[in-house]
Amino acid sequence: MQKTLIGLLFITISVLTIGCYTKEKLLVPNPTSYVFDAGIEDVKKAIINIDDSLIGYIVYAKEDYEKDILSKNIKNDALLRNYYDVGSKMYFRFGKPLPYSPGMFIHLDSISENMTKAEVFTSDTTIVVGGIGVPHFGYTWEKEVSPSTIEEYEILLFIGRQLGQEGMPECHYTKKWLKYRAKEQEKINKRKEKQENSRYN
C-alpha cells in the first residue's frame, strides 16, 4: 500500500511539473557557421575527434563517416547525436538545466584550398519536461523547443581548437547558465579540497 501511494505521488508530481520550466534569454545569438583557415580534409578530421566526453555529442556512425567521407569524399555532412546527456543552457527548472536533445548535422563547403565553411544545422530539438522511472528505463515527456545557437557554436569552437584556429569569438551564454556553471565548479573545488585535506589528515 505504501509503495502504491509513493508511486501515485511521484506520478502526480511529475504531471504537475511538466509545464514548469523557464526559457532564459540569450542577449546575443551565437553564429552557427564559421569559415576556417584549413582545407576541407583537415576539417573533416577535426570533426571525427568530436566525442561525448568532450562536448556531449558523438559523430553518428563514425566508422561509416571515416570510410565514406574521408576516403571516397562522396558527401560533406556529419550527423551528430546525443542522448539527453547534455544539460540545456537555455531551458531550466528549479534552477537546474533540463535534459536537452538537438538533432544536428554539420555541412562543409570548400571555399578554397585552405578555407572551409562549416555550418551546423539543428532539427527536432527537444527537452525532457517530465518522466517516470530512470533514464533509458521508463517514460519521458518531451517538448519541442527552439534551438539556442549555443550548442551549435560550441561545436564550431571545438573544431576550431582542433585546427588551431585563431580569432574565433567567445561563445555567448545565458546568465542563468553562467551562474549554474559557477556553482557547480565551486562544488567541484570544495570536493577536491576535502579530498586533499583527508589525504593529509
Image (tube, rainbow, N blue to C red):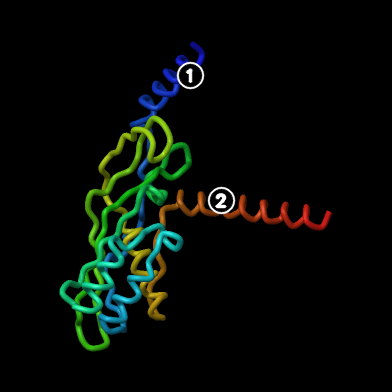
Amino acid tagged 2: Glu
Q: Residue at the location (56% across, 51% down)?
A: 184
In the picture, measured across the screen, residue 199 lies left or right of residue 99, that is right
Real-space Cα separation, disc 2 to disc 1, in angstroms: 30 Å
Amino acid tagged 1: Ile
Element type at marker 2? helix
Q: Nearer the viewer, residue 135 or 160?
A: 135
Q: Residues within 10 Å of mark 2 (few under 14, many from 20)?
A: few
Task: Give the residue furthest to the left.
Answer: 74
Residue 58 position, x and y percent, is 35, 60
On the image, numbered disc 1 is attached to which residue?
Answer: 6
Q: Residue at the location (62% across, 50% down)?
A: 187
Q: Nearer the viewer, residue 76 or 93?
A: 76
Q: Residue at the location (23% across, 88% down)?
A: 113
Residue 9 position, x and y percent, is 44, 19
In the picture, measured across the screen, residue 27 lies left or right of residue 41, that is right
Task: Give the residue furthest to the bottom.
Answer: 113
Residue 201's disc is none
On the image, numbered disc 2 is attached to which residue?
Answer: 184
Task: Give the residue furthest to the right.
Answer: 201
| Up/down of 189 relative to 143, above or below | below
Residue 106 position, x and y percent, is 25, 66
Of the 4 image quadrants, the one containing the C terminus is bottom right
Q: Nearer the viewer, residue 108 or 187?
A: 108
N-terminal label among 2 and 1: 1
Residue 82 position, x and y percent, is 34, 53
